[in-house]
Amino acid sequence: MGYRVLLVDDHQILRQGLKSLLEREDDLQVVGEAADGRAAVKMARELHPQIVVMDISMPGLNGIDATRQILSALPDVKVLALSAHSDAKLVGETLQGGASGFLLKDVAVEELVSGIRTVMSGHTYLSPRIAHLAGTEYLSTSSNGGGRSRLSVREREVLQLIAEGKATKEVAAVLGVGVKTAETHRRSIMEKLNIDSVAELTKYAIREGLTALEQ
């Protein structure tokens, strides 16, 4: 049957194209597709894929935090990140989040297939154009931490939703919590980051790669 693959990307055309290309390979089986990080976490728990090909910049819940949540529930799953951006901080944050590889979206399908097989064999795979960025950035991310690392999983979710323009009531609805709970998370985030306005929170989230750059 081959390796069980879950595809995660907020662009349907890209997902369909990837699925068509991957299923030409005898050792790869696409078992599901998700359009955002929150759906990816749910589907991973239901489908138990062996590897998740994960877009990083997605609305609602980005790929880095989706990776953290998937690996927390299913530590044996491998995650291969896909991104249009080669920023060193983003690469380091993604690896720190538990991804086993990082590919740029403009790679040839042969490199994607090679990346999947490499990751499934227990090794890390990085696109050649970003490999030189990852080592020092990963180490600096691990040793120095940062404001974002002080936030809880739920606080990172709340921060992304706020940065994407959602009001407190909308944040509460998305996360299935009370409005007071959402407001408490917002205050906690501001205190931890020493930020006192939603505008500055949004700038911080964009700068840290928490929300899609194209939005």
Image (tube, helix red, strand yellow):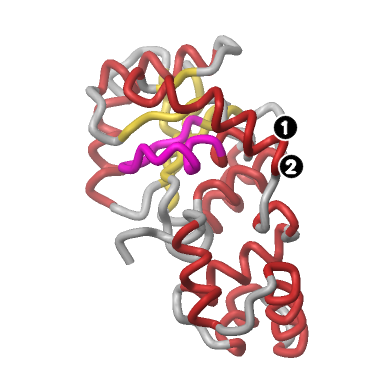
Q: Which of 180 and 5 is in front in this view?
A: 180
Quarter of the figure that contains the C terminus: bottom left
| 205 falls in the magenta region | no
Q: Label 2 is placed on what type of residue?
A: Ser
Side (left or right) of 174 relative to 34: right
> Which x, y percent locates residue 68?
65, 44
Q: Which mark is residue 75?
A: 1
Q: Badge 2 local density, few (<14 within 10 Å), some, or many (20+)?
A: few
Residue drawn at x 54%, y 82% as measured from the top left: 198
Query: Dividing the picture into quarters, in which one does residue 174 lie?
Result: bottom right
Contact (CB < 8 A) between labels 2 and 1?
Answer: yes
Side (left or right) of 11 relative to 80: left
> Which x, y percent locates residue 139?
64, 29
Q: Badge 1 local density, few (<14 within 10 Å), some, or many (20+)?
A: few
Residue drawn at x 75%, y 59% as measured from the top left: 152
Residue drawn at x 45%, y 27% as measured from the top left: 133
Secondary structure beneath dot 1 equals loop
> Which x, y percent locates residue 118?
48, 12
Q: Nearer the viewer, residue 48 or 192?
A: 192
Query: Dividing the picture into quarters, in which one does residue 87 lie?
Result: top left
Question: In the rendered image of this protein, does residue 165 appear above or below residue 91?
Answer: below
Q: Label 1 is placed on what type of residue?
A: Pro
> Which x, y percent locates residue 16?
26, 42
Q: Residue 44 carries which label?
A: none
Question: In the rendered image of this protein, does residue 66 appear above or below residue 120?
Answer: below
In this figure, which residue is indicated by the disc labeled 2? 72
Q: Give the range drawn in magenta.
A: 80-92
